[in-house]
Structure formats: C-alpha cells, structure tokens
Amino acid sequence: MSQDDSCCRVCSRGLYSCHWKHSSKPKRKHACCWFSVVTLVSLLSLCWMYICMVTFNDREDVNWEGFAQLKRWVNWFMVLIIISAVLTSYCVLLLLFALVQVALREPLNLHWLHKIFLFFGVIFIAFGVTGLCLKWQREWPTVPLSLQATAPFLQFGAVGALTLLSLFVFQGFHMAEKKWSKFLIAGIFVVLSAAIFLCPLSIQSPCLIEPTELPEKPKLIGHRGAPMLAPENTMMSFNRSIACGVTAFETDVQLSKDRVPFLMHDHTAGFLLRTTNVKKKFLNEDFSHSSNLTWEELQSLNAGEWFLKTDPFRSVSELSEEEVETARNQTIPSLLQLLKLAKQHNISVIFDLYSSNQENDTVDTVNTILSSGINPKLVRWLPPADREYVIKNAPDFIQVYDNESVMLNEGGDYLNVKYSKFSTEEIREHRRRNIKVNMWVVNERWLYSLLWCAGVSSVTTNSCHLLKDMERPDGVMAPLTYLMIWITVDIASILIMTGLYIFQWKTHCFCKRKGTERQRNKTSAWNKKELSPFLSTG
C-alpha cells in the first residue's frame, strides 16, 4: 500500500468515522442505512440551497417580515443563506468521504456526532420549508419558474455527476454477493440514468430560441428609484436611477396631515421607523398613519442615515465619500418634487397610493399631478380605487391594472403584476395581443433573462445598474445548438461509463482470480507440510 493511499484511508476514515487508527471492530449494523441517510440529507440540502438561491431575488420580503416582527432591521435572508451554505457543504463533504470509504473498501461506521448534525440539518430544512409554506407561499412559484432558466444546465451537471458516481455504483454491483442485490442496484441505476439522459425531452425554456426571434429588451422601471445605490424613495435614489436609463420611476404615495402627497413605502403602524430617525426626533411619540404628521414635520426627518447604518444591499462600500454625505442628508421628498424631476427628464411615474381616505386622497393626488405641468401621458395610474374619477378628470393618464379580468372589462391594455403571476406562455400570449406587461420586482440576471426571452414589456427592479448593461439574455441558445450539446454530452457519458464498467469488471475478476490462487497456494502449502513426513520416508 502506498503512503498516499494510506494517508487517504486515514483521512477519510477519521473524518467519516472519527477512527484515525485502523479499527479491528466488525462493520456496524445499519451502516448502509446511515449511508443512505447521508445521501438523502445531502440531496435535500442541495435542493434547499437551490430554493434559497432562486428566491434570493425576493430577499427583501424576508427581511421586511423580520422587521415587522422585531422592529429591527437585520439582513435575515443573508443569515439564512450562510447557514444553508454551511449545512450543504457539510453534507456534501460527508457524502464524498463516505464514497471514498466505499472505494477504499473501508467500513462505513458513521460517528454519532455526524448523526446528530444530520438530524439538526433535517430539522433546519423542515423549518425552512414550513416557513415558506406558511409565511411566503407566493415564493413557491419561483422554483418551477427558475427551472425554465436552469434546467438545461442542471441536466448537464446531473449527467456529469452520474458519470462520476457510476464508478462507485459499478464497484458496489460487482461486490454484491446476492443476485437480488445486483438486480436492485442495476435497476435503480438504469432507471435513474434514463431519467437524467432523457429529461431534456420535457424541458421547455423560452430562452431556447433563435437569436433572430429574441424579443426586445424589457425596459427598466426604478423600484423606489435605485435603492441599491441610495436610500429608497429619496431624490438621490431617483437621480441615481436616471443614470441607469430607467423609463419610469416607481414609488409609493401617502398624504400628510395638511394634505401634501409625499413618498413613503411603509404604511402600517410605526411606518416611519425603518427609513427615518423619527424615534430620535419625536421622543415617546407613536405615529401609526401618515395623517398624524404635517408636511413640515415630515420634512424635518432624516431619510438617509438608516441606509448607511443598515446597508440593506451591502452596497454602501461602493459609494464615494461625496455620495455617502449626500445619502446622509436625504429627507422625505414630496410627490411634486418627483414629478418635476420626471418632467425634466421625460420619465414616466407609476405609484401605489396608500390611504385610509382613498376618495379625498385620490382627488388631492390627481390635482397635484395636474398642477405640476408634467405631460399627463407620462403618468401611469395604478391605484384601483376611484379609477372612474381619474379617467374622467385626467383622461390622458395611462391606466395600469393589477387584475387581468378588470383590465379586460374596462378595455385596458397595461398590466402590472408580480413576476410569478403568469407563465412564460401567458406572457407570450399577452405580447401577441399587444398587452403591455410590467413585472415586479426583478433583481437577478437569470430572472431578467427569462422574462426577456418570454417577451415582457418592462420590469420594476432594485438593480437597474446591474441589468442596464446586459446586451442579451443569459443562457439563450438556438434549439438545434442545445439538441447537439445534449446528445453529445449523453453519448460521451455513456462511453465513459461503459469504460468504467469494463475497468471495474476486469479489476474484480483479477482480484477474484488472485484470491483463488492465493487460497490454492495456501492449500498446496498445507498439503505439502502435512504430507512431508510420508514423502520423506519414501
């Protein structure tokens, strides 16, 4: 045995079984069952990590839920990602050590400490899935949607993993002593291989498209401006989004005690806590609604320091000293300020209206817009309440709907929905019917690429500075190109696995033959020793 081989045995045995010295103890019961548990938990952790990565686009929803419960802003989703990454790395490494044990024909004696860690890993994943089911059900459609973008490449990875693992499968097949064990191993492996090799037959991705048929790049709408580069819903944020080439500002409007429309997203009890210094400015005051404060009082609040302290998108380090100072001095802007900026740069405005007095607030908001001098065609009216009044008094406003049936009943042609609301086929159908579809909130490249291929008109985004430079969708391929790659990868894998099977078969036969010869030699030596007295007398 070589020194390298011996070192490998010691390391794998020590890390898997915590036996750094060779143990003469027989193979423990249920060792194979625990190997199956390690494999299963590794697959579960990989699936959970995939879910975390594809839902990273909506990380602010998780962070907002944490803030709503604890009244303290923490990047809870990043904590979740770190724990999940550590768990997945641990499980996959443990599985690799187990496979090395199998290859070296070492006993699979899993240490009790690993069993405890695996148990807690399963509990963590179970809590995570339960949390998604109970609190963030709307995140589940993101997973099948993501597979339309990633499935072609996941299949290539699965073929590669199957090819590497086949070596261990073939070794287990040859070592199996009972026929039913061989049939079971062979049956499972063949079914799994067929599923992986042929799954592209069921893959449907809008990005498998001829480059000449690729739709126009979706326009960008700045979600509360450019909140990764500046405090959300501030003039600095909207100015930063202009450099991204946004075609519209998306914001949220509320009205003050003295009927001045201003920009602020949070609108429940404690609505000023997250993004202003209201706690410091108004001690022992608990403001639950925008009408509790006058516009002068709102203007006295700082709306930028929170961004520098909490760094919600881990982007503050990218700001210059001048930009940091500008962010620190931001205040709550009025709707009129935003309209003047939009008018100056010929950029549209779309907003939600949060109000307990919807009728009066709609009237005051419409009057503010009309008095600003902005081109009415740049205003995209989204609030559903009192839409008849808006159509009557501001007929040039573009009416935007969040409900398809209402839009069709009212003869509209503009939808604003969450990115998971429609399938890619439904998006294409709306495009064929000349219905504009804006989807929110799209931050990740894979999601933007998928919606681009599907043909959405525009997306509302936090990361306009990242998406503006994309010249074509990620992962776009002509169907014929994908077909050729798929067939080539599958054939290469089959050839490699055939070679590995032949190698394992010859190795097994050689070892068996050597064992037989060794046994024959031992028997011959014993016979010679036993018969030597008789042979010598002759």
Image (cartoon, rainbow, N blue to C red):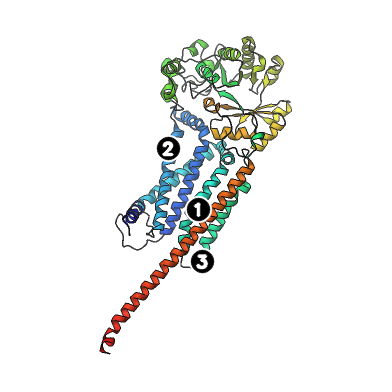
Task: Please report whichever mark, 3 or 1, sits nearer to the chain's N-terminal start.
Answer: 1
Q: CA distance from mark 2 to mark 3?
A: 43 Å
Q: Identify the residue shown where x is 58% and y is 24%.
A: 221
**Residue 401 image offset from top left, x and y in percent:** 66, 26
Residues under labels 3 and 1: Cα distance?
24 Å
| Residue at 45% from the left image edge and 26% from the top image edge | 315
> In this picture, is 233 found above or below 142?
above
The quarter holding residue 29 reads bottom left
- The residue that disc 1 covers is 163
Q: Which is more foreground, mark 2 or mark 1?
A: 1
Q: Which residue is mark 3?
A: 180
Secondary element at image label 1: helix
Percent x, y of residue 233: 52, 19
Whether tag 2 and tag 3 are in contact, CB under 8 A, the answer is: no
Q: Is residue 175 visible?
A: no
State whether residue 485 appears in this view: yes
Amino acid under disc 1: Thr
**Residue 85 or 388: which is nearer the viewer?**
85
- Position above or below: 237 against 50: above
Residue designated by label 2:
82
- Label 3 with label 1: CB-CB less than 8 Å: no
- Circle nearer the viewer, 3 or 1: 1
**Identity, as a three-letter code, of the amino acid under mark 3:** Trp
Of 528 and 262, nearer the camera is 528
In the image shown, does 248 or 356 lie closer to the viewer?
248
